[in-house]
Amino acid sequence: MLILVSKSGPLNALPNITLKKGFHREQNVIRVEFPYNVQIKDLLRAGTPARWSRTMGCWYINEKDFDLNKFYLQFNPLTYINYSELNKNQQKSFNPQKKGQNKLRIELPPGYLEILEQKRRSPNTIKIYTSYFKDFVRYFNNRDLEQINKEEINSYILKLIREQKISPSQQNQRINAIKFYYEQVVGREKQCYDIQRPAKERKLPDVLSKNEIKEMINATKYLKHKALISLIYSCGLRRSEAINLILSDIDSKRMLVKIRGGKGKKDRYVPLAKGTLDGLRVYYKNDNPVKWLFEGEKKGEKYSEASVYNVIKKAARKAEIKKRVYPHILRHSFATHHLEQGTDLRIIQELLGHSSSETTEIYTHVSQTSFSELKNPIDDLF
């Protein structure tokens, strides 16, 4: 796996790319460190099978796909490449396990994986929990897990924060993986087990204008990509919900789309716009998908989340949108535009599939209607 990390640096200087070995989620990785440079970033996107990790906040690809000679030839004209670190041992900061334990095989405690599966946790949740709990077991190697106290666990989390600079999101995920063992597998009461969590961040969502979304769709060449962007925006879909749609989920007679197994394993229906349906029909006649509404290169193969991300990023670049654009921004825009045109907040909550109205209320802070009646005092000066 290859992780791409861009660090701030002078824009007018020839950037240095430093290649280093590392470790992430029980896989060998190679870090690529460089001062921020748009040309290099675009070349990484176009010339490598890079994927974005929201948890890590960086790009990555499998190390087995990394060819040093090819990488050198591709980037050497643009920058100086330092690959001396590749011959050294893996960076400890990427691996919470102790020295000499890189090859130690860690087994999950009996019942951990089984209970996760019985509770029907999503494949992604199972993957994250098992990976993070193995890190925990590895760190406390040869210790009886039931004898590890709250203070030791807090120290372990603090060590990850200080040395690995884990994000608040990853911190919560690691805590949840540990809590799952003690509460669900061992059976401890919740009040008997408590570790410090980060303060909840309150970030306002990014939003595109209707015209920017229109420009993205118009700038997109392929019918499938046009239909994909239109559907995600017009139905307020999560990326995973879009790629999990099958042909029968589109009910053109009732003008509804059925979302199966959304977040929290909840089904819901959302209205299907006529313009979106027209685009889907043109795309269907051209591509003739077999099972999934959006399929990969092979017939019957589900479209990947990485492909959705790349399609939307490419459309934004072609439309010359300067904002940071990603799949979920279309969902944020859908909710905000509904609010601005007067749709009741409760209805927006249902359309988005939010369990709590508090989650939906965040869009009131980015809606233009919240400030439309406001008069700015500086207007009296001119």
Image (tube, grey):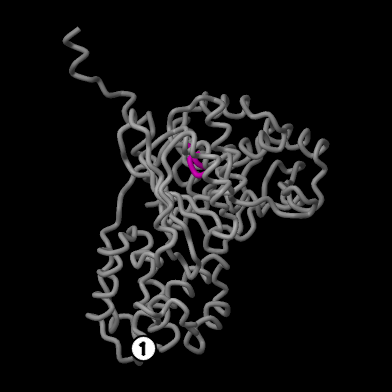
Which residue is the site of mark 1? 145
Q: Which residues are magenta?
A: 325-329
Q: Residue at x 47, y 79 (%)?
A: 103
Mark 1: few/some/many CA within 10 Å (<14, 14-19, 20+): some
In the image, farthest residue toward the left = 381
Instruction: Tell me residue 101's x, y (percent).
Output: 41, 80
Tell me if residue 377 comes above or below residue 111 in the rendering: above
**Residue 36 against residue 27 in the figure, above or below:** above
- Residue nearest the viewer, comparing 110 with 350: 110
Foreground residue among 332 and 39: 39
Q: In the current view of this chain or complex, which residue is farthest to the top?
A: 382
Q: Residue at x 63, y 25 (%)?
A: 218
Q: From the viewer's perspective, tell me whether residue 6 is left or right of residue 230.
A: left
| Residue 350 at x, y percent in the picture | 52, 50
- Residue in the image at 56% along x and 44% along y: 309
Residue 278, x across and y down, in percent: 74, 32
Q: Amino acid at mark 1?
A: Leu
Magenta span: chief secondary structure: helix
Q: Residue at the spot x=68%, y=30% of the render?
A: 275
The vertical placement of 207 against 178, above or below, is: above
Q: Is residue 100 magenta?
A: no
The residue lying toward the viewer, choosing from 286 and 183, is 286
Give the mark count: 1
Residue 56 % position (x, y) = 41, 56
Q: Quadrant of the C terminus?
A: top left
Q: Judge left or right: residue 110 versus residue 378.
A: right
Label 1 element class: helix
Residue 79 or 115: which is nearer the viewer? 79
327 falls in the magenta region: yes
